[in-house]
Every structure is written in structure tokens, then in C-alpha cells.
Image (cartoon, helix red, strand yellow):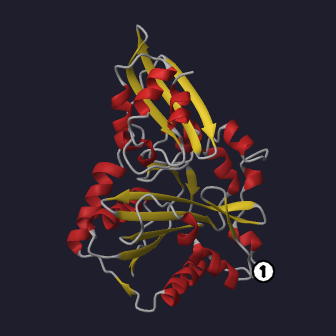
Amino acid sequence: MKYIVNKSHNPAYNIALETYAFRELRDEDELFILWINEPTIVIGKHQNAIEEINKAYTDKYGIHVVRRLSGGGAVYHDLNNLNYTIISNKAEEGAFDFKTFSQPVIETLADLGVTATFTGRNDLEINGKKFCGNAQAYYKGRMMHHGCLLFDVDMTVLGNALQVSKDKIESKGVKSVRARVTNILDELPDEITVQEFSDRLLGKMKASYPDMTEYVLSDEELTEIKKLADEQFGTWDWTYGKSPDYTIKRSVRYPAGKLTSYVKVEKSMITGLKIYGDFFGIKDISDIEEKLIGLRYEYQDILAKLQTIDTTSYFTNITPQEIAKAIAE
């Protein structure tokens, strides 16, 4: 295990850095990174950015919007939010073992006198309130796990900047996004800063991995990371993309995540399809979308095609029947 020191607060650069470490530093079996963003909404790989954010608010207050490589839902970061990334060649592809990779956070909080628990599909909670969401991505047998820790985040901005759908709030059994989250600082018996908490978490990792050393990025690697930030993660096209051309929109929420389908139908045939959502998966869902184009817009036709595909690689814990139901009745 090696760790990378990242002092940048630029969200596009920070996502580029973890992506570079994930995809290019494959000779390093395990890497650990801690990072903090300026006020930012980070949306999941499969989400429709415009539907997840309050764009008038983010524009007015200069809040960045960036898209990450992993699935899951949108999260709000600011300078009092700590993010961590664990990259490994040793994780079994598709395992999505969020609980194991969240253990250093749980143990660090235990040392500080706070009991945290893993709950739901990817959340960490204190006294029933979420303070951390986790997501994962896979690439050529390599896994990247990252989580965002609400340390002392401005909850008013969080509530205003994120456009949380009513069905998500209802599925959690609470009345608002504010009611279901907490800051770590509010739960600690003794006050510390986000940097002190970051140092504690790194210390916990070093204790767990006694041979852990720093990986220092070369000038050439830093140049490549900046290029990735400028040409991909900092671009409008990557974050927002093209608005889907559609005639039918369907949304369904399942325990494993929400699916929203934008379907273009002409003469009862599917001529265009885009699937968004906060679900998790390994492969690129454009593969699925392309395979369904040209079919009759009928539930049974769509289901029959999906049953010839290993959909588990694209939609974790969502059945072909559920996917078809999110596209047609």
C-alpha cells in the first residue's frame, strides 16, 4: 500500500488525479488518497446532471459541477468535506464490498469516541444519520473505491444545491435531505479540524499497513493529470453531455437504485435510448442502449433481448425484468 499526498482543492483536477492513479499506475497494487474539494457537486457516472442539481443556485454561488467515473448518486463537497480513495488490484471484480473498504473510517471514528455503522447499499451512519456515501469503479481487473465524509459541511448549501428527487427521500423514510444527514464534527465529543481528522485517518491506514510509503508523482505524471482535468473532467461535454432526444420518459426506483429512461419511439420502434440513474455497475451502459435500439417498444420484446445479455455487469442487483420495466410498461 502506498499513499499519494494531494493538496489540490480543484474538483476536476482531483477526479483526474484519482482516475490517473486508477488507470495508469497499475504496477502499484494498492493506493490511498485523501483530498478536499472547493464547493462542488459531484454527480455519478450514469446521472443526468441537469436533473440532479439546482443549476440556478450553483451558477449564482459559483459551485463547481463535475462527473466522476463511478455510479451512485450526486454528493455535495466543500472545504469541510474529506474524500478518500482506495485503489486495489486485489479486489474481486464485481464484489462491491463497500463495507470492508469503509472499515478504516469506522475505526478512526471509534478512536474518537463515535460509533459509526454501515447501512443500506453504500452508506455510513451515526445514530441513523448518513455522513458518508461510497461508490466504486472497475477497470481491467482493478478497483477504485471512494467515499465522501461530511465533516463540517454547510448543510444549507447542500440542501439548496442538490435537487434530491421526492422518491429518493420517501424511499429512505424521511421528510427531507437535511433530516437524513449529519456532520461528523457534530457527533464528536471533542472538537477537531477537518485536517486533523484527515491526519487521523491517514494514521489509521499507516497502522493497518505498517509498510505503507508515499508515492510521489513525477512532473510528467502531474502534467498528464492536468491534461486529463483540462480535456475531460473539467469540460462541459463530460459533465453535462447532450440532452437526450426522447418521446417517452419513465422513472422507477428499486432498492438497488433509480433508473430513468429517455426513449425515442417512432412507428412503435425504439430509435433512441438513454438510461440515467444512481445505480451501480461495472460496464458502460451504452452497450445495453445500443442493443435495444431497433426493437419494438414492447416490454416483452425488451425483456427477451435483455435476457440474452449478462445485465449484472451493467446494473448491480437489478434484474432484467426490472430494467425492462424502467423502459416500457
- Residue 174 in percent (x, y) is at 78, 47
Q: Residue at x 64, y 45 (%)?
A: 255
Looking at the image, residue 219 sits to the left or right of residue 39; the answer is left
Above or below 62: residue 126: below
Q: Is residue 79 visible?
A: no
Which image quarter: residue 3?
bottom left
Residue annotated with mark 1? 189
Location of the C terminus by quadrant is top right
Location of the N terminus by quadrant is bottom left
- Residue 71 in percent (x, y) is at 48, 50
Which image quarter: residue 216?
bottom left
Residue located farthest toward the left when viewing the structure as drawn: 220
Above or below 153: residue 197: below
Q: Residue at x 45, y 92 (%)?
A: 210
Above or below 176: residue 295: above
Looking at the image, residue 233 sits to the left or right of residue 198; the answer is left
Which image quarter: residue 170?
top right
Looking at the image, residue 228 sits to the left or right of residue 240; the answer is left
Q: Amino acid at mark 1?
A: Pro
Residue located farthest toward the top when viewing the structure as drawn: 267
Q: Residue at x 41, y 53 (%)?
A: 69
